[in-house]
Amino acid sequence: MRNEKTTEEVARGIRARVFEHTIRNNGGYLSQACSAAEQLAFLYNEGLNLGPSTMPLVPPPFSGVPSATNHDYVTGAGYNGPFDAVHDRLFIAPAHYALVAYACLIEVGRMAPEGLEMFNRDGSSVEMIGAEHSPGMEVHNGTLGIGLSTAAGLAFGRKRLGHTGRVCVFMSDGEVQEGQTWEAVQAAAHHEIDNLWAIMDVNRQQCDGAMDDVMTVGDIATKFRDFGAVVAECDAHDLPAMRAAAATPHPGRPLIVLAHSRPTQGMESLMSRFPRLHYVRFKSEEERARMNQDIAAELGVAPVALEAH
Amino acid sequence: MEMVNRPYASAFEAYATQHPEVLCLSADLTSSCEIDGFRDRHPDQFLSLGMAEQNMLSFAGGLGLAGFRPFLHSFGVFLYRRPYDQLMASVAYPRRKVRLMGFLPGVTTPGGMTHQAIEDISVIRTIPNMTVLEAGDATEVESIVAEADTVDGPVYCRILRGAVPRLFTEPLRIGRMRVLSEGDDVLVVTAGITTEEAIRARGALARAGVSVRHLHLNTLKPFDAAQIVDHAASVRHGVVTLENHLITGGIGSMVAEALAEAGLPRRLIRLGLQDTYAHGGSRPYLMQHYGMDALSLVRAVERLTGKGTGIDEDALGAVRIDAVHSLVKAEAL
């Protein structure tokens, strides 16, 4: 697909959309847009080989869970393009980043802006925690730590089928607290699954707060290397560095790109809430109004017009 | 009674080698699950995933997404207890064609609590999209491989290993229970290793003048409630279920649900583990100790009919004892 925007523009658009949504709904996964905007923009705009979306621009309503009788069931993966031998596949492992991922789909022209209006609405497929049927999602990853294993299995299978397309996982650093992440890396290394790579948003934050306070994880680059992965590191807000890291050769091993990010990048006003950044809900109308003005100024967009109460 | 040596090993190899989309996965219990020969002869179709069941379940989900049909081999208990979340999210919800081959069901292992899958049927049958099968003899072990692979979705199978008696000649067919006798005093419902116990009890009960209707189940989900109700309606005194499992959530519960929903008033005695863990020991010892053997079944039938039969252990004939050092037995654990 020909890109209509630069990756920098896509990243800016992601922050602006998630900001607007969060202010309007008085809550949202705002910090994840700060840390991950460049990563998702990079993946969709240039890093992955994705075909055109096979799904409608406006997401269809929830059409039931998979069952023996639900013959029309489809996942949201069609937003990432067709399933064929040559194109890449993407899993959003931390499904809590769904709002950011949806904003990205809009910015790259795969979903209509109206899609975000359906976010977390009853009967909608645009769910708060990305589900299989949500736009851009292919598997359930809401229980953190299972995404890389599934991707490793898919990548092993695709290699066996002779596919040239690769499997990519967008991960969050909190997932390294789950034992399954390490099981997945050791299995991918043992079976030489090198059509698998991940980019991890290393923002050092998790639901309870700063990871160092919740559970220290140590030097994850060394740990990943010791478990058999090739590791590349970059500043998550430096796109040339991200391009170089993602291009790291990794024959016979999975590649993990550690993208070191700032949880308030582009919205420094959020630092007043640190370390409670996982889900931003404003404590008062006053805080909401202040954040609306301050963050809008930082992003260079107009403040969100809020309805009179 | 004919004893068959390692029926799973030969049946799986014969089937898998004809189906390249079938992959053989193991979690460090390869010889214990009788797939060591397959690993050695077909290394390209075998994946060792080590002692890491959480990864194995999600990895298998990914293989399913790629169009493969992985057969996961481990002790049954390791396929659902630790990786329950992965079973739910990566396998069951998306209806991946993953075949969970659970060896050593219930008290068929001397490994004690950590190794004995005593609530697997209860847990897995409540998971939407799952199919649950159980093999009760060598013929069913042989035929469960191909039959499980016909399921359009995930399936969990209770598999018997080592020296397995051959009770049946017809292969296992999903959804088709076996009517082993058509008496009209008491209905006995069994599955897996308890069927052999019931066959022994039945012979003695017949000589004592008790007419038993005996059903052998191999498909636990979907459960054919209508047939169970029909059979229960055709006996005089009531129903006994005998299962290698807790009585809660398993066959006893399924039969109770069927009778209640149909509004059929029949007394029901559920034999099996009575809200207790088992411990390590031989299969005959455990079955006798926990009231899961032929004599326990006879006593339950006597309670239903209200009449003693005079049947004792001697009357039931010698209990089959596996030779511990026999070559046909897989390694202990």
Image (tube, rainbow, N blue to C red):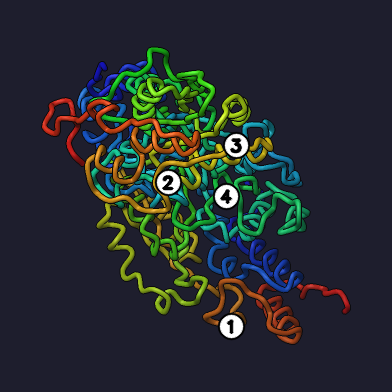
Residue B22 in the image, given as x and y percentages of width and height? 39, 26
Residue type, numbered disc 3: Arg
Q: Earlier in the sequence, mark 4 or mark 1?
A: 4
Relative to A193, residue A237 above or below:
below
Q: CA distance from mark 3 to mark 1?
A: 64 Å
Q: Which is more toward the observer, B306 or B260? A: B306
Q: Which mark is residue A273?
A: 1
Disc 4 element = helix
Whether residue A158 is visible, yes or no, is no
Q: CA distance from mark 2 to mark 3?
A: 21 Å
**Residue sitting at 39 percent across and 33 percent down?**
B298
Q: Are marks 2 and 3 on the same chain?
A: yes
Disc 3 element = loop
Q: Which is more toward the observer, A280 or A302? A: A280
Q: Which mark is residue B266?
A: 3
Chain that bears disc 1: A
Residue type, numbered disc 2: Leu
